[in-house]
Amino acid sequence: MDGLPLLTSILLCPVIGLGLIVLIPGGAARAVRWVSLLSALAATVMSIQLWRGYDAVTGGLQFVERLPWVEAVGISYHLGVDGFGTILVMLNSIVYLTGVLTMWDLTERVKGFFGFMLLLVVGVYGVFMAQDLFFFFFFYEVAVVPMYPLILIWGSGNRDYAAMKLMLFLLAGSALLFPALLAIYHSAGLGTFDMVLLSQHRFDTDVQIFLYPLIYLGFGVLAGMFPVHGWSPTGHVAAPSAVSMLHAGVLMKLGAFGILSVGIRLLPQGAAHWAPTFTVLAAIGIVYGAFVAIRQTDFKFVIGFSSVSHMGIVLLGLNLAALGQAGEDALNGAVFQMFAHGIMTALFFSTVGFIYDRAHSKTIADFGGLGAQMPRAVSIFIVAGLCGAGLPGLASFWAELLVFLAALKTYPLVGVVVIVGLVLTAVYILRVFRDAFFGEANPRWQSLVGLDMAGWQLLPRAILVGVLLFFGFFPRFLLDVIDSTTTSVLARFWMQ
Amino acid sequence: MELSLFAPELIALLGGLVLFAAPILGAGSATTWRLAVLAGSATFAGAVWSLPLSGEAFSPGIYYVDAFSQGVKVVVSLGYLLVVLGAREPVTLKAHAWSELPLFVLLASVGMMMMVSATELLTLYIAMELAAYPVYIAIALHRNPAIGGESSTKYMVQGMMASAVSLYGMSFLYGLAGSTYFEAITGQMGALSSTPLFWFGIILLLAGFLFKLAALPFHFWAPDTYEVSPHEVITFVASVSKVAAIAVLCRIMSLVMPAGMDACSVQNVLMWFAVGAMTLGNLAALRQSDLKRLLGYSAVAHAGYALIGVQAMSANGLTSALFYAVGYAAMSLICFLVVATVGRDQDRVSVEAMSGLWQRSPSMALVFLVGLLGLIGLPPTVGFIGKWFLFSAAIEQGQFVLVLVAAINATIALYYYLLVLRQIYLVDAPTDAAPLRWTPALALSAGVGSIVVVAMGVVPSPIWDQAAAAVATLLH
């Protein structure tokens, strides 16, 4: 790495890509695509290196870089990853790479699209690496901003409404975070925004109880938390494929990651105090999202609401972790789900986008027997669907299993409710399969027969399917890395 | 008397003489403009050179030169230079006034530079008026006499009222302290601070500067004046004068801060002004269809944000207010440079006029995007970190609710800024719209402005440290 630290190098990949894209003249779409792809490849290779280099036996924060930034007010450029960060950086790289490949055929305002997309990726990497509250929030906002132009300009359908709604929801969340993050800084009285130092401070119980819900709600908006999830399905539906991939695949994880690394890590007692309330909300989110998904007529709305439901599992896991009885399973499951759901929704949107680009319809009822006309695209969608339904052999299975076990141990009733949610998931997934893919072929789509995925178009989907299968059969690789950090996070609850 | 301490102002004044003489001696507007750029550069160089100086330029107690005053002068002179660079052809002014604009704006800049050094009430008052009158005249030079007259009169009447209120406040201070020197007033703070009339006087004194800042309750002029004034003049009013106003507010606050808890009444009043300005500015902006008017209300809202730092009455608070003012000046400048170019042929610039700006000139759209991201308060611009500093200073004082109100306000503001962005990037330009071209000078000005907006957002420490040092000398 020639002296450049690994994390900064990963962060620089999209930054340099962005810089080059700005310099490339608008007409040179090919060059823009290749720059995006190369930067994504470089970032992915380095992320693999990061994963391999992360020592799961020692655990804790590794690859730390620290540089004073605004010393007078205690802001430092402090990067580092724990086990969670390592796998989420990997997740972002995979979605980034496959997203670029998915949008390879884009022809409209190519330069702007990839520019904003890379900016989004910079923000996401930054959040997963930042160990300073200021930079955490800084990158968080960097990740949110590009969503507006991306949906507004390249989106479809009700994009005007969707883009505005998304921004207003997310920045309303930030409005809660702003005072809360600053209050964390000032009530610690350490004169630093360094999250590592802050996590060693024991905050007043009252302060924790006061601040935690602000943090939870503020980040929860982005995590698609019930009842502030309204922006998420509309946003998913209106966004172009790669943006939906990034949005559902990684952006929503930022919300959960924020709750975890700011809320739970810095304010554990606040988390424990509020966990019962938020557990109930998360459980409602799981069942509600699944119920609403059953009634949808649009592919993307089904997936959009399934995201609300699946992110509910992540949030449930986080809250159960704060309650303690089955903390380890719950937290492992939550983080595992962040990764698995990220890959899964990326696969969903990548494939739905492919079908939509050819059929120009996302209405489930329009199709029927599409499996005969586009067998490859449909098979891939089915893999994603089965993963969503928690089929063993695919990554989500382990995540959902862990969280449900934890739920049953902690609150049996919640566990039962959540299992109902799982059944409902199977219902809406199988319904889509039946109505759109199986049954009699609709002659209207006969024209699609020659347009099925072929050649390199299969590449991004194959990568995603491969990852789902790999971690479905070898969850240990993921769990070892996660578990190394889970223990230390949970220790925060015993310490105090 | 130490003349070198007065160097930046002196250079500017000499420049003013040249700019005054040049048209009389037959120089065309192009030559005058070049001279103005020269005068601006020289003033800027002088200000930078004088940065490490400190002392008193005239008889003791009247005119301080220190890190604070010189720092602000650097910003003001740079702002002047950028505004003039962008006003190569101030088409919204009468043709014969093209060579007069740089002069009036320069004189106003001198007034602002003197304002921040003044440490005596009458000097402060005179400097304040020097900063105001040239602008009244410049606005009246609008190419459409009816608009110019109306707009200038509105601005002038309200401006003079505000300065009269300030003068009234000064009379209280003089009456109570028996002196117009800040030093003397600080010296008697112990006795004065227990007098309610003293605080009343201080609040009245603030009026003139709240007016310049377009803060509540002296904000009424902003939307009207912004809407119809010549674009080039309002570019100056919307950027440079805010820095000077905030700087003087900091100076006055530093005067009363030693009184500690006794100063609460001022702090309280300013806090409510801040809340009012933010809320009113943002809510009113939601309903505007005229872009300049919208930016006028947004200026009211931003005055409110800046006041958060001022009312925090702490070193961090004043520093963050200064820092934000500098950043805001840059964001506002680049927005207005673009608005002035797009609206060359119109007296008013509607939001609709921005339609399809990215097609007409992608780079101009990008500059405007940077400016708007700053105004919204998003990274990587100074708008984000500036708000972070301001809010941090308020939280430090335990003002959690105030910060929450401000942050919610920023969310409301998002809506109308996004509508403008939507117009630029989503709506197609009318087919007969001419492509927009950068002149080199305009590009330089907008380029420097944009770089400042982003650089201060990403690497804030140089400016922050400078501002902190300035405030430290103030509180010394």
Image: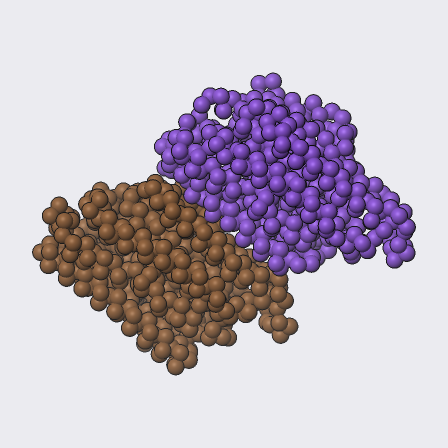
Chain colours: A purple, B brown
Q: Position of residue A211 (x, y in %)?
A: 44, 38
Q: Is residue B325 among the parts visible in the rendering?
A: no
| Above or below for A255 versus B411 | above
Furthest-left residue in this view = B178
Q: Position of residue A92 (x, y in %)?
A: 64, 37
| Above or below for B413 versus A308 | below
Quadrant of the rendering where the C terminus of chain B is positioned: top left
| Above or below for A159 versus A206 | below
Q: Give the residue displayed 40% in from the left and 34% down from the top.
A: A207
Q: Is residue B271 among the parts visible in the rendering?
A: yes
Query: How many marks overall?
Result: 0
Q: Give the residue displayed 22% in from the left and 60% down from the top.
A: B204
> Is residue B137 shown left or right of residue A285?
left
Q: Give the residue displayed 66% in from the left and 59% down from the top.
A: A158
Q: Give the residue displayed 79% in from the left and 45% down from the top.
A: A431
Of A488 and B417, which appears nearest the observer?
A488
Q: Position of residue A30 (x, y in %)?
A: 72, 50
Q: Position of residue B73 (x, y in %)?
A: 31, 54
> Is residue A79 shown left or right of residue A419?
left
Of B197 and B215, which appears nearest the observer?
B197
